[in-house]
Amino acid sequence: MLRPEIFKGLMSMEEAEFDKFADEYYAIHADNISVSGEEPAYFAEYKIRDVVKTCSGLRSSTGALSILDFGAGVGTSVPFLRRYMPDARVTCLDVSSKSLAVGRLRFGNDAEFVLFDGSLIPFPDQSFDFVFAACVFHHIDHREHLSLLREVFRVLAPGGAVLVYEHNPYNPLTRQAVNTCAFDSNARLISARVMRRRFVDAGFLNAFVRYRVFFPASLQRLRALEPFLTWLPIGAQYYVAAYK
């Protein structure tokens, strides 16, 4: 949770400042992906639809699934999780206290927002049924990936699942978008093969890769083909999924 002194400092800011921070983030992101012809919400929603499919076979001992959004930022996933999984208990975890404050201000009734120290996930073993991360790991030093995935493994309940989405470094449009994005100035992309290997090394079972986002908005009629192309390593993004 946020330390009291941090929380007090953040809450002394005007609501308009939080909105400005969130709006600037959205505007930069929207401009960066404009070549796709889509808004950021499109990419956030398709990920949650993938989450729903993966969670369909999961069961929770408490009835409602507990979901950890690892690297949640300002909580972009929250409204879509509420739309598609209204009964789930959602926790947003991030190292940015300001981002969490923005998320709490906007979606505080729909999720819990928790500060992360970058090393230890502040929850007991087996706390969550499902963990996902939306294009987070390319911002993290690759030397830390394995230890963080082991932390995810620790807080995941037996039989639980994890999905990690990342940008595909072999897609030229993706590389262009990352190379020109202010938020990605220190990013280092990860291949699906390498990410899957890290899942295996962290102890996860049945890790597999699916490629996503093949057609821009101008070719949206072809998107009906995308479920049949998830094996093809030219999608703009991919995810690695695995189980405990």
Image: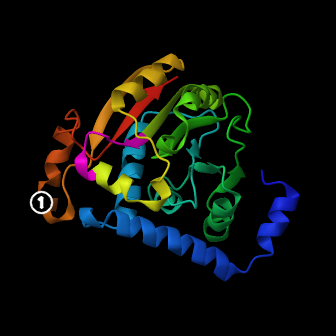
In this rendering, position of residue 167 left or right of residue 159: left
The answer to whether residue 110 is magenta is no
116 vs 79: above or below? above
Q: Percent position (x, y) of residue 19? A: 60, 77
Residue pictured at 50% horizontal, 43% vertical? 133
Dividing the picture into quadrants, the one containing residue 171 is: top left
Q: Residues within 10 Å of mark 1 (few under 14, many from 20)?
A: few
In this rendering, position of residue 158 left or right of residue 176: right
Dividing the picture into quadrants, the one containing residue 211 is: top left
Q: Percent position (x, y) of residue 93? A: 64, 48
Span colored in magenta: 165-173
From this viewpoint, which residue is outermost toward the right? 5
196, 153: nearer the viewer: 196
Q: Percent position (x, y) of residue 73? A: 57, 56
Residue pictured at 47% horizontal, 42% vertical? 138
Q: Percent position (x, y) of residue 49? A: 37, 50
Residue pictured at 46% horizontal, 18% vertical? 200
User: Which residue corresponds to mark 1?
Assistant: 221
Q: Amino acid at mark 1?
A: Arg
Total number of numbered labels?
Answer: 1
The type of colouring in the image is rainbow
Dividing the picture into quadrants, the one containing residue 60 is: top right
Residue pictured at 60% horizontal, 25% vertical? 150
16, 44: nearer the viewer: 16
Helix, strand or loop at label 1? It is helix
132, 60: nearer the viewer: 132
In this rendering, position of residue 94 left or right of residue 124: left
The answer to whether residue 172 is magenta is yes
